[in-house]
Each structure stands twice: as structure tokens, then as C-alpha cells.
Image: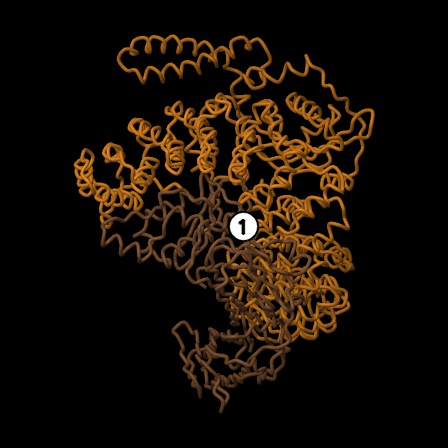
Chain colours: A brown, B orange
């Protein structure tokens, strides 16, 4: 997160520079006039997305190896400062991605042309996000609910001489940010209708341009002609959740230059599925000289920059994982005054913690034989426990 | 796309200059150029790739230009693209060689494949070589009529590029009207969008010189065009939607039905996945409803959720930009966001610039119902690892305390901060307790008890120390040890580095003396003596002042130094509401991110001295304008020897004539430059010769003042203004906020006007003589800002003017708002003629 220290919009004497950083690569755009800042930033994000889509991932070497593709893409995405085509499907028809198959072919045949000779029809089609001739042998559509839980947990602060701090955890804020991701592998021009069992819990929604607005407004039904392949159909927010799946109970006692720490982790509300990939991370306060930490489950690591990571994984059935140890404070400091914040990560497969449920998915204009799949996952987003 | 042209980069030892490689490439390309063997395209492609990657990492490969062009005869599209890219990058530095490429580009413009036609046309327009523009007109004309929309899209942007290379060629070829036709009729939305952006740019640039262009620009925001674009908005790409929405935000609807129609049509844009579209829509909503208070509030309610979602989704960069916009809305209408305060809670991981914005918003939305939670949350941050944020949050607690009526609980919290034994927390808290006591003197007993227990040795920061000393002086009657603490502080006078603290110490000792004379007398003597010996001028002067005051009369001194105080009810706000309104007017622009109105950072004059690097590029322009603008101080210096200099110049002219006559056959280019110099000299002398008999200031006016001056005399202004117009500042502000800008223009100021404008007052008197009254003015040379108003003679129709004058560039930027839009042009003429007559 260090790179975030610089602002996304920077002023220089002559130009204003927008920057975003993705995978260590800085994408810059500059302007000399007033303009909507989000237009610059969103466009850069789109460029980064499309490049990583084309090159598989983003790194300096990949970009250097593929200068020509990068130029070709930029050429179609922006002209004279105006964004043109940023729809991945159309771009893919104009400039073929350098995938493994075409690389193999070029080795075998010595022909490395990666451009289709025809101009994409979709530029003039009424459904600009969908290529015209899509054909699949097996027709499949997958709908994933991907949710992130953002939470802040602490208890009322006591600035008294009582240095023992035990906290049961007060839920200060708990929200879910979710996305409906669709992977659509369907032939022709399908028309889909997706409905939820409980759309009323959604607090705010944002849609992919393919979603028709009226059906949602009147019946909370998502009706759309999907783009081909993977895309984000909608994003939503669910406010004011009442509970979290796990608890983290930190306890810090300091006296005469040493601080004893103990952290307990356990399941608070069983979501019905396994909670895995539990990781606890916290920054030791700068006034701590050394720390000796051990746990009864999982592994504990303290890096040189005083970031401590406790990887728990799954919570075992027989015991509650706990971390304990002592820390030595700076000389001259009797008690600890600055307390660490614990950042928690976890993942629960098969459950959308917001409670959002997909009712049904209807398809029109599609072959009879097809497979529909639904999945859900909840992850910790900005989930923090203050000690 | 423009890869950096780094042709003049000096080779460094770590980076190979590529000289050997370039000559290698050159010979290889030469071999391939003539060959027609099968599979030749692949070898070419490898070579081209090498050239392109050299070019990208900054090696100058312009030397192979000729060979690249020779190799360009190919049907392979990737080769073509690479070749176009290369040519586009180097044509500007090799204008002669660029001519070579015209041929094959023009041929490609007629290719069967629309993709090649488009690409060729794009590259042709990207050459940026001024003397090749004649070759552009034909292909562009054809491109605009092409039956493939891709080619038309490219051609439209091509017209704009042509305009930037050579505006007259573009105008003469009648391209703008063609674009307008395309914009209103083309079936392809991208073509329409490109036409719109091209036309906006061309007409705004032309508007300063051509009446017709400014009319056309106005026509873009007329009802038929706006409705046409709105009806098609769903067809447009997300970026084009932003463009259209920006335009709609400028549109002024006739009645409220129209407003509601537009808002209903656009409501679903708020749910678009692209944040730029959402913000542009919000801007339209806010601007449309500005005059309808209750609807405006509903709009806030409606846009709240989308904005909050945008903040929590997307990358940190996006969230920050959205957050800045949210910030400005929260500051305008905090009560609407009061229930959403939890969204402004800081997460541990967020960068500090985000936290800072959030803290400001938390402070703003605090009210009776949520203060407890917010202050509790802020107290969490006080123990934060990030010290600047910890400080900010303590300040935020203080600000909330100052804006609330029920501060009971907050004062307790602040006092707890004092007990936290962290020096920066104590320091910030002390400053806050001082401010609190100034507003709520009734809390003094509780606070003093705690403050008294703080050892002054633990407080090092000047601001905090000053606050502590102030409290010691102010409440010395309640603090047992006050005189003795002050005494020990005075004893360490020499060690105290901050003059601010020493000043406060002097005053505190005085106050203490008035309340407890016997205990303080000795300290007072020591403090005054130390103050008089102080090397800091202010401290010395204050000590002397106190000393003489005490000598004169002790009770008078007490009345001066320690008068009975009234509680401060409102602390001065740091940012004026006028600036906030300006930023709000520029919603969804960079102004919001910078928290400054755009003129503060886009105006070159405002940005000050670092501008020179930019100006270097425009040296020729600067040189031209230099002899038009006569600097103010030059007026007196020049007038005496004008006659002399005229005759001298005559001589010089004669001399240069001879020289040019002599050397012309030898040096073509230098002769041309001598001639152009000559033209300047002769025009100066021609300008000064007849005027030597006239007034001096006219003399110096040269061409600039000569043009506007006769106009008011021959054409009397058609608009009659009320010479005794009255408008109170409140009404002015209200009107200024409500009315749209009906005219925005830039006038040149005559040099004598510039000379006269040493203070704002000079212009005020002058404009008043023309029935244009000033309501507010300010600034220092070279930047002045005025708000004027005027009323029509017969009716009470108002004109409001904002006029920003920069004397160093001799330009006045004028924004006119009018009750009656139709007369604003006439008023603008009156204003301009009045302004042009301004002189000493």
C-alpha cells in the first residue's frame, strides 16, 4: 500500500497528470485543461484492465515484449485525447490477443499475424458489447455472487489509568460490498433474466451497460443481453449487518516496560460452511523494540518492518486458536499508549453473507441443451479489529 | 497515442546509443525493401518490431526513415500499423522526409479494407507537419463521406487534428458545417460523439475571433441539439455519455417540466458501472435544480447512495476522486449526510490523504444525534500510529466541540487526551482547550484543574506552549501556582526559541500581575527586562510598550492588556463561501480534487513563476506581444526621448535597407529574417511618427488602443444604464449563484489602462462614470478581481459581472450574468467600451 502515498492527480507547472499504479507499473495521463477527473482515472483503469487481459498479467517485461500490441490497443482506445473503443469484445475482434495457441502457431508456421483481416461487425451493431458470431459447442452460464465484508470492531475506549484492555468487540460498522459476476459461454444472441429472492436488502446497485433499466425499476428483475465471457453484471451494497462470522479478541497489558499480548480467534456465528484462509495481520507500534510471539495454531511471522502476520487457516474443532507473547517497549516508556489494529482476512465458500439469494435465471434465444451454474463466496474486505 | 519523441536524448554509458544497431537495421531494411520474395513480410515484421522497440526505449531511429518508407509497400496490416506508428512519431522532426510518406498514405486511404482506410487517414492526420496540410483536405473530405462508420469516426477526429495544425485550412475547407451535419444525422453514435467533441473544441477556439463561431457554440447548448443528444444517450459509449452530460449541465431549461423530463430520462445513468458517467449525471442534476431548493435537496438524497457505493468500490484512485466530490457535497449540506456518518470512518489501511478528507467530513456531519459516536470514533484515531492523522483527529474533536451546544462529554474527552502522556496529543489538546475556553468560559474550572497539573517542561511545541501560557495568564486567579510557573518560564527566557511563546509570556505575566500583584511583581520586572533585551523586534517592542504603559498608568494598562472579554461565538472560517461556491459550480472537474476554483490553477498568471519553462516554448509569441504591451513603468521613462528615438530609427531603417539589399542574393534565409525585423521597426516608427504631436499615452498605445478607442465615439451604446442603480451585496450573491453565465469573454486592456490600474479603486471610479457599479474588489498587481453590477435605465433588469484583470498580460476575463439574457451581448459591448476608455 506504500505506493498510495502519492495523489492520483498531480499538478506540474504545465500539465496535470493522472496516475494509477497497477502491479508496479504506473499508468500516466496528462491534461492541460479542466476535465472530469474520473474520466481520466477510469480510462487509465480500463487501459490497465485491457492490457492485463491481453497479456495474461501485467509486468514490465511483458509490456516490453509486446510493445506492438500495446501500441495497437492504445491506437484503438484513444484518438487525439478522446476515448474511443474500450469494450474488450470489440477490441479482441480488431486485435487478436497473443494467446498460447497463436504463439504455438507462429512457431510452427512462421506466421505471426495477430490481426483479423475483417473489421468487427459489432462496431455498428446495436449490442456493442457483444461480438456478432459467437458459437459454443457446450452452452454454459455461471453466475457468481462475490461478496466482501467491510467491518470495524472495537469497544468503548477507556483512557483511564487502567491499562488492562480487554475487549469483547463492539461492531462499529459492518457492510457488504458485493458483485454479481457472470461467465457467459452461450451461442448466438441470448437474452437473460435474473431475479433475486430478496432484492429489497440491496441498498444501492450499479449495472453493466447491458442491463435494461425498466424491468429493474418496476420488478427488480435483471434483464440483459450478456457480453461474451466473463463480466461484472452488477455491484451492490448491503448496509448495517448485525453480526460477523468470526470474533477476534485482543488483550494487551503493559507494565514496567513490557507488554503482554494475547489474541483469541473463534467462530461467532457459524455460517454453515467452513471458514478458511484466516489470516491476522497487524503493525507493531514503533515504540516496541522486540516481540516474542507464539501461537497454539498456525504460524506467526514478524517481518523487519514490524508487520506481524498470523496465518491461521481453518479454525480447528477442538480448540480456539490463540496468539500470545511479550513485547519489550522502548527504554523510558512504562506503558503502551499506541495500540495496533488487527486486519483480518477470511474466506467462506458457498455463502453470501449478505443473505442475497438468486431466485432464478431464465434464458431466451438459446439452444435447449445448456448448463447453468451458481456459486457464492464471501471474503473479508476491509475488516479490522482495533485493540 | 503518442510515444515520447526522444530524438535528442544524449546517449549515456549505461544505455547503448544504438548507433551500431541503427546502421545495422538500415542496411537490413535496405535489402528487404526491393525484395518481393515470399515470406518477406515476416522478416520485415521482425525488423520493424526492433525499430519500434528501439524507438520506445528512447533510441533515435529517425535515421532509417527513408528505408522504412521504402519498406512500407505491403499488404500486411501489422506491418502497416508499425510503419504508421513510426512515421507518426518521426514526421514532425523530419518534415522533408515526411513528404515521402504522403504518397503511400494517400493510396491506403483509398484501400478496399475500411480498417486500412481508417488507419491510413489517422496516420495522415497525425503527421503534424504544417506544409503538408494541403494533402489532408482531400482524403478527409472523402473520409467524412465514407460508408463505413469506422472511417468516419477517424475522419472526424482528423478534422480536429487538421484544425490544430492549420486552422485556416480547416475553416476554408468548410469542415465544421460538415461535422455539424454529421453530428445531427449520422447513424453511428461514435461518429456523433466525435463530431460533438471536435466541434466544441473548434468553435470555442474560434469564438474569440468569429461571431459566427460563438453563435454556433451557443447553438450546441440549444434545446433541439440537447434533446437530440439526450434521446440517443443510451446508444453512446460511456465516454461519449460523459461528453454529452457535460454539455447538458450547461443547458438552461425553460421551465421545471423540462427539468423533470431531463432528470427522469437520466436517472438510470446513476446506476452506470462507470464512475465518470455517474458523476457527470450528478453534476447535471445538481445544476438543473440549483434554483429549486426543495428538489435540490431531494437530489442530494437521491445521489447519496450511488456516491457512497462508488467510494467503496473501485480502486483507491477512483475512490479518492469520488471522495473529493462527496466532500464538497457534505460541506454544502452536512445535515443530509448526518445519518451516513459511519461511511466516513477511517479504515486503518487507507492512505492519509483519504483519512484527512474523511476527518473533515466527520467534523461537518456531526450533530446532536451522532456527536457521541463520532467523537468516540475520533478518539480511537488519537491513539493511531499515524501521528499526523492522530493530530488531525484531535483537532476534529475540538472543531466539533466548537460547533456544538452540548459539549459536556467532549470536554471530558479532551481532558482525557491531556492525560494520555503523548507529547503531540497533549500539544494538540492544549491548543483546543484554549479555543474552547475562549468560546465557553464557563468550563474554565474543570479545564484549569487538569491544565494546572501539566508540567510546562513536557510541552515543547510553540503553539501548545503559547496556549498553556495564555491559560496561565488568563486564569491566574484560579491557578495556585500560576505566578511561579510563569517565573520559572521567565527564568528560561534565553532558552526559549519561539518568539511567539515569548510574546505570550510577556502578556501572560502582565495579566497575572494585574490579578496577583504582590506575587508577580518580581517576575514582571524580570520579564520586561528580558523582553527589552530580546533581539526579536516584536518582542522588544511589546516589552517596551508594556513598560511605558505601566509607567503612564497601571489601571489604563490593565484596561488595554486585560479588558473584560466576550466569549467568541464564531471563529473565522478558513475558506470563503465564495470560493466554495465556485468549486461547486465546477463540480466534476479537477477543481474539486484540488479544492480550488479552476482559475487558481489553470490560469497561467495565477500559477506564478514556475511557468517559465512553458513560456520558453512560446518565445516567438512572447516577443511579438512584448512590443504591444508597454510596461507601466516604461511610460515615464520613454516619453522624453521619443522624438529622438524616432529619428534614430529612421537611420536604422536606412541602414538595414542597405544591408538587406546587399546580402539578399547571398543569404536567403537571413535576408528574410532581416526583412521581418524591418517590418517591425517600420511599424513602430510609423506608429510613433504621427503621434509625436499627440498626447504621450496615445503614443505608447500603438495599435492596441487605436482600434477600440474610436468605436465608442462613433457608435453610441445601444443600452442605457441606470446611473443610480442599487443592489445590496446579499442580493448580488444570491443572483450570482442562481443565474447562469450568459457571456464569458476576454478583453484586451489598453496599455494606458494597465498603467492606471495600480489600485482597484482607480477602475471603480472610472466604471461608475459609465453607470457600472462595483460591489466588491480586491487583489494586488498584477492580478485584480472585481464584481460589478449595472441596471437597465427603464426597468430593474440587472447585469452582474465578474472581471479578473491581469495587468502583466493586459487581459481582462469577464463573466457576465444577466436577468435578461438577450441583452447581455449589448451590455458586454457597453462594458468593453467603458473598460477600453480607462486610462490615467
Residue B178 position, x and y percent, is: 53, 27
Residue shown at 50% from the left, 15% from the top: B641
Residue B338 position, x and y percent, is: 70, 62
Quadrant for the C terminus of chain B, please.
top right
The residue indicated by pointer 1 is A38
The subunit letter for the residue under badge 1 reads A
Crowd class of label 1 (few under 14; some 14 to 19; many from 20; radius 10 Å): many
Foreground of the two, B739 or A239: A239
Residue shown at 37% from the left, 59% from the top: A57
Q: Is residue A352 above or below residue B209?
A: below
Residue A247 position, x and y percent, is: 56, 81
In the image: residue B445, left or right of residue A360: right
Q: Is residue A109 above or below residue B181?
A: below
Residue B584 position, x and y percent, is: 65, 47
Quadrant for the N terminus of chain B, please.
top left
Residue shown at 27% from the left, 49% from the top: A112
Q: Is residue A12 visible?
A: no
Foreground of the two, A95 or A261: A95
Could you tell me which secondary element the residue under label 1 belongs to?
Answer: helix
Q: Is residue A220 visible?
A: yes
Foreground of the two, B563 or B621: B621
> In the displayed image of the protein, which residue is found farthest to the front?
A368
Amino acid at each position: 500500500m506504500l505506493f498510495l502515498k502519492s495523489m492520483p492527480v498531480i499538478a506540474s507547472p504545465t500539465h496535470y497528470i493522472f496516475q494509477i499504479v497497477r502491479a508496479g507499473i504506473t499508468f500516466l495521463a496528462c491534461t492541460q485543461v479542466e476535465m472530469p477527473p474520473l474520466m481520466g482515472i477510469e480510462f487509465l483503469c480500463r487501459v490497465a484492465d485491457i492490457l492485463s487481459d491481453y497479456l495474461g498479467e501485467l509486468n514490465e517485461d511483458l509490456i516490453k515484449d509486446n510493445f506492438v500490441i500495446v501500441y495497437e490497443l492504445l491506437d484503438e482506445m484513444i484518438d487525439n485525447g478522446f476515448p474511443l473503443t474500450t469494450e474488450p469484445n470489440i477490441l479482441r475482434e480488431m486485435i487478436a490477443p497473443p494467446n498460447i495457441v497463436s504463439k504455438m502457431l507462429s512457431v510452427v508456421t512462421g506466421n505471426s499475424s495477430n490481426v483479423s483481416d475483417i473489421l468487427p461487425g459489432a462496431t455498428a451493431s446495436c449490442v456493442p458489447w457483444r461480438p456478432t458470431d459467437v458459437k459454443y459447442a457446450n452452452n454454459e452460464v455461471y453466475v457468481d455472487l462475490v461478496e466482501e465484508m467491510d467491518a470495524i470492531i472495537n469497544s468503548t475506549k477507556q483512557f483511564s489509568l487502567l491499562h488492562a484492555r480487554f475487549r469483547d468487540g463492539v461492531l462499529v460498522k459492518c457492510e457488504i460490498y458485493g458483485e454479481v459476476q457472470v461467465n457467459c459461454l452461450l451461442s448466438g444472441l441470448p437474452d437473460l433474466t435474473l431475479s433475486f429472492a430478496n432484492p429489497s436488502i440491496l441498498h444501492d446497485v450499479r449495472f453493466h451497460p447491458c442491463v435494461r433499466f425498466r424491468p429493474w425499476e418496476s420488478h427488480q428483475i435483471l434483464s440483459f443481453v450478456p457480453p461474451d465471457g466473463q463480466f461484472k453484471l452488477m455491484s451492490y451494497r448491503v448496509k448495517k449487518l448485525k453480526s460477523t462470522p468470526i470474533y477476534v479478541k485482543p488483550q494487551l497489558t503493559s507494565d514496567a516496560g513490557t507488554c503482554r499480548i494475547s489474541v483469541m480467534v473463534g467462530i461467532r456465528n457459524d455460517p454453515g460452511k467452513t471458514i478458511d484462509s484466516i489470516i491476522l495481520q497487524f503493525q507493531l507500534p514503533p515504540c516496541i523494540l522486540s516481540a516474542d510471539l507464539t501461537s497454539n495454531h498456525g504460524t506467526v511471522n514478524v517481518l523487519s518492518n514490524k508487520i506481524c502476520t498470523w496465518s491461521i487457516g481453518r479454525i480447528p474443532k477442538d480448540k480456539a486458536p490463540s496468539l500470545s507473547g511479550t513485547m519489550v517497549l522502548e527504554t523510558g516508556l512504562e506503558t503502551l499508549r499506541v495500540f495496533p489494529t488487527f486486519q483480518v482476512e477470511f474466506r467462506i465458500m458457498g455463502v453470501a453473507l449478505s443473505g442475497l439469494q438468486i431466485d432464478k435465471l431464465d434464458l431466451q434465444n438459446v439452444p435447449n441443451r445448456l448448463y447453468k451454474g451458481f456459486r457464492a463466496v464471501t471474503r473479508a474486505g476491509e475488516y479490522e479489529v482495533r485493540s | 497515442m503518442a510515444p515520447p519523441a526522444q530524438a535528442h536524448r544524449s546517449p549515456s554509458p549505461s544505455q547503448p546509443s544504438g548507433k551500431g544497431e541503427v546502421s545495422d537495421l538500415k542496411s537490413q531494411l535496405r535489402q528487404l525493401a526491393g525484395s518481393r520474395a515470399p515470406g518477406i513480410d515476416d522478416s520485415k515484421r521482425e525488423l520493424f518490431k526492433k525499430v519500434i522497440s528501439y524507438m520506445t526505449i528512447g533510441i533515435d531511429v529517425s535515421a532509417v526513415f527513408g528505408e522504412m518508407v521504402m519498406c512500407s509497400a505491403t499488404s500486411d496490416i501489422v506491418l502497416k500499423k508499425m510503419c504508421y506508428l513510426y512515421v507518426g512519431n518521426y514526421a514532425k522532426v523530419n518534415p522533408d522526409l515526411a513528404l515521402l510518406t504522403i504518397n503511400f498514405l494517400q493510396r491506403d486511404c483509398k484501400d478496399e479494407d475500411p480498417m486500412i482506410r481508417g488507419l491510413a487517414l489517422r496516420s495522415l492526420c497525425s503527421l503534424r507537419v504544417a506544409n503538408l496540410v494541403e494533402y489532408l483536405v482531400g482524403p478527409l473530405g472523402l473520409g467524412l463521406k465514407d460508408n463505413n462508420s469506422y472511417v468516419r469516426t477517424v475522419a472526424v477526429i482528423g478534422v480536429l487534428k487538421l484544425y490544430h495544425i492549420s486552422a485556416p485550412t480547416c475553416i476554408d475547407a468548410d469542415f465544421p458545417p460538415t461535422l455539424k451535419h454529421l453530428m445531427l444525422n449520422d447513424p453511428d453514435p461514435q461518429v456523433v460523439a466525435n463530431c460533438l467533441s471536435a466541434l466544441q473544441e473548434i468553435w470555442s477556439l474560434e469564438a474569440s475571433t468569429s461571431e459566427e463561431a460563438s453563435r454556433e457554440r451557443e447553438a450546441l447548448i440549444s434545446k433541439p441539439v440537447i434533446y437530440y443528444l439526450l434521446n440517443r444517450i443510451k446508444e453512446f459509449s460511456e465516454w461519449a455519455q460523459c461528453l454529452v452530460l457535460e454539455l447538458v449541465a450547461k443547458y438552461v431549461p425553460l421551465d421545471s417540466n423540462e427539468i423533470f423530463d431531463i432528470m427522469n430520462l437520466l436517472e438510470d445513468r446513476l446506476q452506470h458501472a462507470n464512475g465518470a458517467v455517474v458523476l457527470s449525471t450528478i453534476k447535471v442534476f445538481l445544476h438543473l435544480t440549483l434554483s429549486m431548493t426543495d428538489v435540490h435537496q431531494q437530489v442530494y438524497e437521491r445521489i447519496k447512495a450511488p456516491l457512497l457505493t462508488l467510494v467503496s468500490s473501485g480502486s483507491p484512485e477512483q475512490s479518492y476522486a469520488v471522495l473529493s466530490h462527496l466532500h464538497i457535497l457534505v460541506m454544502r449540506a452536512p445535515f443530509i449526510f448526518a445519518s451516513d456518518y459511519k461511511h466516513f470512518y477511517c479504515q486503518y489501511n487507507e492512505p492519509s490523504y483519504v483519512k484527512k478528507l474523511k476527518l473533515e467530513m466527520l467534523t461537518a456531519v456531526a450533530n446532536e444525534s451522532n456527536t457521541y459516536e463520532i467523537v468516540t470514533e475520533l478518539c480511537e484515531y488519537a491513539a493511531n500510529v499515524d501521528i499526523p492523522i492522530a493530530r488531525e483527529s484531535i483537532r476534529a474533536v475540538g472543531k466539533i466541540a466548537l460547533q456544538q451546544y452540548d459539549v459536556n462529554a467532549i470536554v471530558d474527552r479532551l481532558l482525557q487526551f491531556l492525560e494520555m502522556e503523548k507529547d503531540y496529543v497533549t500539544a494538540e489538546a492544549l491548543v483546543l482547550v484554549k479555543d474552547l475556553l475562549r468560546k465557553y468560559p464557563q468550563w474554565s474550572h474543570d479545564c484549569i484543574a487538569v491544565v494546572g497539573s501539566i508540567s510546562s517542561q513536557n510541552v515543547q511545541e510553540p503553539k501548545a506552549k503559547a496556549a498553556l501560557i495564555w491559560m496561565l495568564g488568563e486564569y491566574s486567579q484560579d491557578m495556585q501556582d500560576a505566578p511561579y510557573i510563569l517565573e520559572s518560564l521567565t527564568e528560561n527566557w534565553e532558552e526559549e526559541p519561539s518568539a511567539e511563546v515569548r510574546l505570550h509570556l510577556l502578556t501572560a505575566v502582565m495579566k497575572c500581575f494585574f490579578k496577583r500583584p504582590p506575587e508577580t511583581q518580581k517576575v514582571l520586572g524580570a520579564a520586561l527586562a528580558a523582553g527589552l533585551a530580546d533581539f526579536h523586534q516584536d518582542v522588544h517592542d511589546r516589552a517596551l510598550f508594556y513598560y511605558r504603559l505601566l509607567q503612564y498608568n497601571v489601571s489604563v494598562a490593565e484596561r488595554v492588556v486585560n479588558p473584560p472579554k466576550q466569549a467568541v461565538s464564531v471563529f473565522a472560517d478558513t475558506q470563503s463561501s465564495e470560493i466554495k461556491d465556485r468549486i461547486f459550480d465546477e463540480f466534476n472537474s479537477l477543481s474539486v480534487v484540488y479544492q480550488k476554483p479552476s482559475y487558481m490553477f489553470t490560469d497561467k498568471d495565477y500559477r506564478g513563476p514556475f511557468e517559465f519553462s512553458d513560456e520558453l516554448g512560446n518565445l516567438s509569441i512572447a516577443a511579438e506581444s512584448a512590443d504591444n504591451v508597454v510596461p507601466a513603468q516604461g511610460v515615464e521613462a520613454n516619453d522624453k526621448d521619443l522624438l529622438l528615438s524616432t529619428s534614430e530609427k529612421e537611420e536604422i531603417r536606412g541602414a538595414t535597407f542597405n544591408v538587406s539589399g546587399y546580402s539578399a542574393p547571398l543569404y536567403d534565409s537571413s535576408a528574410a529574417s532581416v526583412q521581418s525585423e524591418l517590418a517591425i521597426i517600420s511599424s513602430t516608427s510609423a506608429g510613433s511618427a504621427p503621434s509625436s504631436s499627440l498626447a504621450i499615452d496615445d503614443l505608447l498605445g500603438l495599435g492596441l488602443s487605436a482600434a477600440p478607442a474610436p468605436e465608442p465615439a462613433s457608435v453610441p451604446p445601444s443600452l442605457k444604464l441606470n446611473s443610480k442603480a442599487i443592489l445590496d451585496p446579499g442580493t448580488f450573491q444570491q443572483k450570482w449563484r442562481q443565474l447562469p453565465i450568459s457571456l464569458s469573454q476576454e478583453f484586451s486592456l489598453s496599455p494606458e489602462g494597465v498603467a492606471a490600474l495600480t489600485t482597484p479603486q482607480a477602475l471603480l471610479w472610472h466604471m461608475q462614470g459609465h453607470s457600472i457599479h462595483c460591489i466588491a474588489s480586491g487583489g494586488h498587481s498584477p492580478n485584480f478581481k472585481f464584481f460589478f453590477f449595472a441596471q437597465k435605465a427603464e426597468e430593474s433588469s440587472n447585469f452582474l459581472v465578474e472581471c479578473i484583470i491581469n495587468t502583466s498580460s493586459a487581459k481582462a476575463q469577464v463573466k457576465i450574468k444577466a436577468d435578461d439574457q438577450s441583452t447581455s451581448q449589448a451590455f458586454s459591448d457597453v462594458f468593453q467600451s467603458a473598460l477600453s476608455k480607462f486610462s490615467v
